[in-house]
Image (cartoon, rainbow, N blue to C red):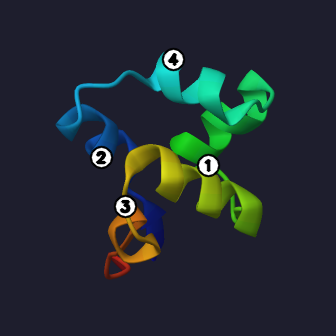
Amino acid sequence: MVRLNALSLLQAQGKTKYWLFKQMGMSYQNFNKMINNQTSSVRYENIELLCRLLHCTPNELFLFEEDPS
């Protein structure tokens, strides 16, 4: 399973989820679903913006976890 690692990156940089929300310019509902891994897709433009804002690469932005089943 692929998961977004944005919250860990934010915490490591001392930034808040609210700060990221304001920078992203998305609706709060869509932002919250994305950031909490409650969606099955993320747009390329959002991946690029997240990487720029969090000063990371897509490899750092996403985690691959084994499926527990």
Judging by the rendered image, the residue that carries numbered circle 4 is: 18
Cβ–Cβ under 8 Å for marks 2 and 3: yes
* Amino acid marked by disc 1: Gln
Q: Considering only vertical position in the picture, is 17 above or below 57?
A: above
Spatial separation of the CA atoms under disc 4 and disc 2: 14 Å
Tag shown at residue 38: 1
- Which sits earlier in the primary sequence, circle 3 or circle 4? 4
* Amino acid marked by disc 3: Cys
Q: Quadrant of the C terminus?
A: bottom left
Of the two numbered discs 1 and 3 in the rendering, the one whose residue sits closer to the viewer: 3
Within 10 Å of the Cα at label 2, are there few (<14), some (14-19), or many (20+) other Cα atoms? Answer: some
| In this rendering, position of residue 4 left or right of residue 11 | right
- Which sits earlier in the primary sequence, circle 4 or circle 1? 4
Judging by the rendered image, the residue that carries numbered circle 2 is: 9
Can residue 25 be seen here? The reply is yes
Spatial separation of the CA atoms under disc 1 and disc 2: 18 Å
Judging by the rendered image, the residue that carries numbered circle 3 is: 56
- Which sits earlier in the primary sequence, circle 1 or circle 2? 2
Q: Residue at x 37, y 61 (%)?
A: 56
